[in-house]
């Protein structure tokens, strides 16, 4: 799909603030792709559509999780998790995007997972550090992303876990597994 077509499609399903966030993720992801040698076209598509399902009604996302036999766990760990796997499902179904690497980058952009691909890492980190983000700790991850993608990923995932624990929120198994994977230096 052409970049301009993709941007037009996503603009129609997101409020302005979220669209600007998406442009930030796109800019950041393209620059990381250049630095670390990822496929530019795949990075563009994944960045543009990573939050495609963010504003779908929760009831719709929940029925998709059930009907498509996604993990029941997603329903227990809070609505924030749903838009990533549901987004991967919907961009294939509604937009015909069928590149599995792009779909996985969308599917795992919120939690991460063990054995993330370069594309998945770039989307996860770009979502975290794009210029419109301002939460505490973001500058450290921005800096790390310029020199070591895995250290940036580890910091981003660690910060997310700290954040969830501080709010007494449940931590999704993929998030913990992504953390352990990096700490244990598994290849
Ligand atoms: O969609 P965005 O806001 O751009 O960012 P995102 O897709 O990374 O979603 C961030 C939200 O997801 C934030 O509210 C924290 C939440 N989150 C991330 N990992 C987990 C999680 N929530 C739970 N319950 N468990 C997780 O492991
Ligand atoms: Fe998201
Ligand atoms: Fe994120
Ligand atoms: Fe996002």
Image (cartoon, rainbow, N blue to C red):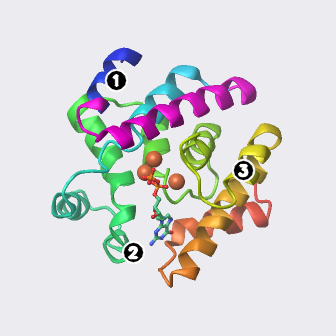
Q: Nearer the viewer, residue 169 or 174?
A: 169
Q: Position of residue 167 (x, y in %)?
A: 51, 81
Q: Position of residue 103 (x, y in %)?
A: 42, 40
SS type, badge 3: helix
Q: Image height check: is 79 above or below 44?
A: below
Q: Is residue 97 left or right of residue 40?
A: left
Q: Which residues are magenta?
A: 11-37
Q: Is residue 52 left or right of residue 21?
A: left
The residue where tag 2 is placed is 77
Task: Compute the Cα span from label 1 to label 3.
Answer: 29 Å
**Magenta stretch contains residue 16:** yes
SS type, badge 2: loop
Asked if the beta carbon under badge 1 is closer than 8 A to the nearest atom of ligand 4, the reply is no
Q: Image height check: is 131 above or below 140?
A: above
Residue drawn at (53%, 66%) of the image = 174
Residue drawn at (48%, 56%) of the image = 110
Asked if the beta carbon under badge 2 is closer than 8 A to the nearest atom of ligand 1, the reply is yes
The residue where tag 1 is placed is 6
Task: Compute the Cα span from label 2 to label 3.
Answer: 28 Å
């Amino acid at each position: 799909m052409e970049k301009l077509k993709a941007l037009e499609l996503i603009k129609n399903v997101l409020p302005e603030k979220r669209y600007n966030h998406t442009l930030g993720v796109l800019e950041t992801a393209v620059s990381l792709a250049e630095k670390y040698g990822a496929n530019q076209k795949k990075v563009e598509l994944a960045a543009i559509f990573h939050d495609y399902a963010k504003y779908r009604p929760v009831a719709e996302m929940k029925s998709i999780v059930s009907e498509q036999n996604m993990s029941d766990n997603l329903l227990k760990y809070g609505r924030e998790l749903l838009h990533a796997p549901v987004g991967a499902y919907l961009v294939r179904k509604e937009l015909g995007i069928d590149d599995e690497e792009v779909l996985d980058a969308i599917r795992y952009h919120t939690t991460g997972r063990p054995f993330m691909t370069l594309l998945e890492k770039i989307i996860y980190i770009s979502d975290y550090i794009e210029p419109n983000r301002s939460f505490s700790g973001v500058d450290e991850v921005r800096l790390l992303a310029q020199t070591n993608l895995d250290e940036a990923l580890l910091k981003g995932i660690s910060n997310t876990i700290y954040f969830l624990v501080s709010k007494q929120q449940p931590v999704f198994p993929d998030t913990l597994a992504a953390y352990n994977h990096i700490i244990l230096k598994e290849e």
